[in-house]
């Protein structure tokens, strides 16, 4: 349960009152200018002056950004390719067909759908297609990295499912297969949901599939954070190793516009999944987002292997540099991570919420995160900090820059240097990293 402090409530009220005052004192055209100004300020600060280490964010290429404001942003593509509810969509059909084929080629899968507006909506499709109210599912608990996508406060709760925790090894940050084997035969779930907001290492899919072949459950993996790595052979072959469905975000390591993707190979699932997508959960989806995604997928086909490899290399380098500087980084004994994510225990510095706020004053953007040992009720004040290297990698940073970034952490959190002073140095540091790499705009 979220408990807000008086300071947080006061801050929110001040922001809302500021918006009310702006509306009261200005004509609509002046409000328009204020909106443009706010967006411009954010672009200058977050886009040019910060080190962004948020794991859920990634830069899209200049071409993809332009397509988000293209003419097709006004068009409604309701229906299936070649079978629309509206006339005049022949070029939209061409665009969506190309996007689907690009996706299938990149992920080596038989079926793909790109119409979902968010990764969590992709997960909802799985629950509506593969379960019935009252069914039992198993998913990763939140302190072990689980996400609301697969818990009672998310789609499973909306669907009326019963949720049982997957036993998880907090030291190895993966499924505890010995305990899983004992529990799964007692629970006999309809679906195993492998989704994690703290995704550091591959899952034992082959072993879980073997048990599923006997018990009859389906497996779906939410690869929201790993999707670009999966596509480029830097994680695990999710569908090849036993998952029935792979979902994910088209942002993050796939580095396209925000949205959802769903992939599968099993012909017997096609009718149920497509019905759940349309007319179930997607109708007039954003065609401009599909156009931007198509370009992003083409970029992944051209540059993805080098990009994904550098993302993971940077994550390992940043984790190592922080560890050697005295920070407590999870899973040091197994190389810290195999994704873009790093998990740090910052309880001794005041916890994840406090540390993220202090770092933001120094122009370092991170987020709080639950860690093993926290309880779900600690969500607002967890002990952990989650870091990701996708955006800094796409700006062209490599291992040596990760060591510099670790040094900024030391200055702010260990040496207690004034954050505003560190921010000035970070602005200077960022001047050398302003252009998006691993895209046609740079190479062409």
Image (tube, grey):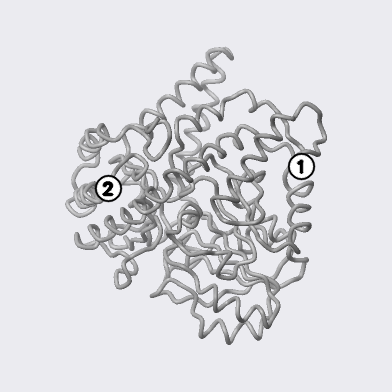
Which residue is drawn at the image coordinates 33% and 52% (left, top)?
A: 355
Task: Say left or right for 318 vs 221.
Answer: left
Which residue is drawn at the image coordinates 52% and 13% (left, top)?
A: 30
Residue 57's tag is: none
Disc 1 is placed on an element classified as strand
Q: Which residue matches tag 1?
A: 80
Spot occupied by residue 368 in the image (x, y as percentages of width and height):
41, 54
Which residue is drawn at the image coordinates 28% and 62% (left, top)?
A: 348
Disc 2 is placed on an element classified as loop
Q: Which residue matches tag 2?
A: 398
Which residue occupies the foreground of this view, 94 or 321?
A: 94
Nearest to N terminus: mark 2 or mark 1: 1
Spot occupied by residue 111 in the image (x, y as percentages of width and height):
67, 54
Task: Say left or right for 124 vs 338.
Answer: right
For the N terminus, the image quarter is bottom right
Task: Say left or right for 234 vs 96.
Answer: left
Quadrant in which residue 219 is drawn: bottom right
């Amino acid at each position: 349960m979220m408990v807000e402090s008086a300071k947080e409530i006061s801050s929110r009220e001040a922001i809302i009152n500021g918006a009310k005052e702006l509306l009261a004192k200005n004509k609509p055209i002046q409000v328009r200018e204020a909106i443009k100004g706010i967006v411009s300020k954010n672009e200058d600060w977050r886009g040019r002056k910060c080190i962004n280490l948020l794991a859920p964010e990634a830069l899209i290429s200049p071409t993809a950004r332009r397509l988000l404001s293209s003419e097709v942003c006004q068009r409604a593509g309701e229906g299936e390719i070649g079978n629309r509810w509206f006339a005049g969509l022949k070029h939209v059909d061409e665009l969506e067909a190309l996007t689907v084929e690009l996706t299938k080629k990149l992920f080596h899968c038989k079926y793909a759908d790109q119409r979902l507006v968010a990764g969590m909506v992709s997960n909802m499709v799985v629950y509506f297609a593969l379960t019935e109210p009252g069914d039992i599912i198993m998913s990763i608990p939140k302190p072990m990295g689980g996400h609301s996508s697969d818990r009672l406060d998310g789609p499973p709760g909306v669907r009326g499912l019963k949720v049982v925790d997957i036993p998880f090894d907090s030291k190895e940050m993966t499924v505890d297969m010995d305990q899983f084997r004992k529990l799964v035969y007692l629970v006999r779930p309809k679906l195993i949901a492998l989704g994690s907001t703290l995704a550091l290492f591959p899952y034992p899919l082959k072993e879980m599939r073997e048990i599923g072949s006997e018990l009859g459950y389906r497996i779906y993996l939410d690869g929201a954070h790993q999707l670009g790595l999966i596509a480029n052979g830097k994680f695990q072959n999710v569908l090849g190793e036993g998952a029935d469905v792979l979902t994910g975000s088209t942002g993050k390591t796939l580095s396209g516009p925000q949205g959802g993707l769903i992939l599968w190979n099993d012909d017997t699932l096609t009718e149920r999944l497509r019905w759940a997508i349309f007319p179930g959960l997607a109708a007039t989806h954003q065609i401009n987002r599909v156009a931007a995604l198509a370009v992003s997928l083409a970029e992944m086909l051209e540059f993805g292997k080098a990009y994904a490899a550098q993302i993971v290399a940077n994550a390992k380098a940043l984790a190592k540099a922080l560890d050697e500087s005295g920070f407590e980084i999870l899973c040091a004994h197994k190389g810290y991570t195999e994704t873009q994510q790093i998990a740090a225990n910052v309880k001794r510095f005041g916890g994840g919420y406090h540390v993220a706020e202090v770092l933001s004053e120094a122009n370092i953007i991170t987020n709080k995160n639950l860690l093993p040992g926290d309880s779900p009720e600690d969500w607002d004040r967890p002990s952990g900090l989650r870091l990701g290297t996708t955006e800094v990698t796409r700006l062209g940073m490599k291992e040596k820059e990760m060591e510099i970034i670790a040094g900024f952490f030391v200055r702010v959190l260990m040496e207690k240097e004034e954050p505003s002073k560190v921010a000035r140095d970070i602005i200077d540091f960022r001047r050398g990293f302003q252009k998006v790499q691993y895209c046609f705009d740079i190479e062409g």
